[in-house]
Each structure stands twice: as structure tokens, then as C-alpha cells.
Amino acid sequence: MWRLRQLLRRIMAEWRSRQIGRQWARHLERLPQGADGKILLHIGCGDIDAPGFVNLDARPQPHVHIVTTNLFKLSMIPDGAVDLIYMSHVLEHVSHLDVVSTMREFLRILRPNGVLRVSVPDFDHILTIYQATGNNIAAIEQPLMGGQDYPFNYHYAVFNDAYLRAAMLESGFREARGWDPENCEHHDFEDWASRTIPFDGREFKISLNLEAVK
């Protein structure tokens, strides 16, 4: 009986995988591709509509191609379907308990040599802001805890360079490296990856920019 259940589960999983693959293939006919023909996925795109990206977000907008209330369970996308995943100030909205498993889901949908490109608030920068402003909590509330102005805008994890690199490698990626938003392929738009935080007449860096290679 146990072996029969296992066989049925495997048959159902294979059937579901084929169905998802066919649905994705049909869906791609209506989705954009990069100028080089690559599939570029922007998770948590918000108001940004970058040319060539498939936009995925929890809030419906005219430029959002895939609307889902869970940005981190991508069952609608088959294995090995995407060349680049981009996320700017989104991964911190995942529980710190689920960061590695979430990045494994991203690894699943990436093609060989595909890239997960991430920008997150850098906890080391947050500490710098805190100390530079005389231990002013108001200066770090938003980058540390999120804007909290709508249900999805809460932070559940913190990162610095060493912590995020280690999580990327633990997730199964073979390499983790920095990336420069001012000099980077498929990044000809401005977002939090390059912004600073103003406080009391000063500008402070806030973002950690790393990418992981499958």
C-alpha cells in the first residue's frame, strides 16, 4: 500500500509538472522577453515597469503580468524557466526562518547559470545611520522594520554581506558576488538598489547588492 501511494504521488507530481510547463509555454506568448531573448523576472516590481521584464507583484497594476499574494511560492513557473530573477528590497519581507527555503524556490525556476539578483537593506548601513544620528530610532525605523503602511510592507529579516552570502550558498547557489546598479546589465532603471536615505540634511547609503549564480 505504501509503495502504491508513493507511485501515485510521483505520477501526480509528473502530471502537474507537465501541466505547469504547458501553461507557462502558452503564457510566454503574452509575456515580454529581454532584448537578448532571456526571461527576466522582476519579483515585487511595485510601480516599476522595466522593459523586457516579466513583472510579478501582490498588488494588481496595468504593468503587472503575474499577480499573486505570495511572491515566494512560484508554483505557476516550471523548473529551469527563468534566466534572471531581480528583487529590490523584497527579500526582507520573508521570515528569517524561511530565507534559505525561499531562495531554493528561486534556484528551482532558474536555468543553469541563471542569476538571482538581490538588493536588501544592509544592517551594517542601518547601524551606521543609527550611530551617525546620535542613536536616533526615528532615523532607522523604516529601513529596519518597513513602512508598515499596507499589509505586505513589513520586514521580517535583516541582512549584511556575510549573512546573505552564506544564505545564498546554503540555498544551493554556486557563487555569490556583488553587483553595481550603476553599471549592470538589465538594470537601466532607478530603484532602492541605488537610492540613499535622507535624514537631517544628510544622505545615507542603505542597500546591500548581491547576486547568486546557479
Image (tube, grey):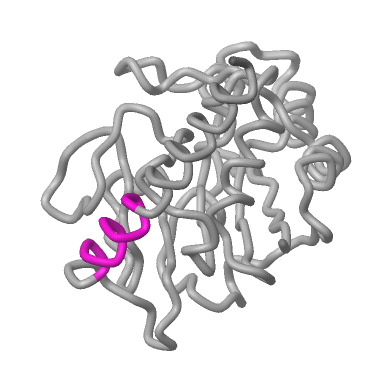
Please give the range of residues in magenta: 19-28
- In the picture, which quadrant includes the N terminus? top right
Asked if the stretch drawn in magenta spans residue 184, the answer is: no
Indicate the position of residue 22 as horizontal and vertical percent values: 29, 60
Is 16 on the left-hand or right-hand side of 206? left
On screen, residue 105 above or below 28:
above
Q: Nearer the viewer, residue 88 or 97?
A: 97
Q: Residue at x 47, y 63 (%)?
A: 81
Position of residue 179 measured from the top left corner of the image (x, y, whole percent): 69, 65
Taking depth in this image into account, of 157 and 3 the one nearest to the observer is 3
Image height of 72 relative to 189, above or below: above
Q: Is residue 98 left or right of residue 32?
A: right
Q: So how many labels did they put on this image?
A: 0
Residue 73, image x and y in percent?
45, 34
| Residue plotted at (74% across, 14% down) | 135
> Magenta stretch: residue 26 in it?
yes
- Secondary structure mainly formed by the magenta segment: helix
Residue at 42%, 36% in the rendered image: 12
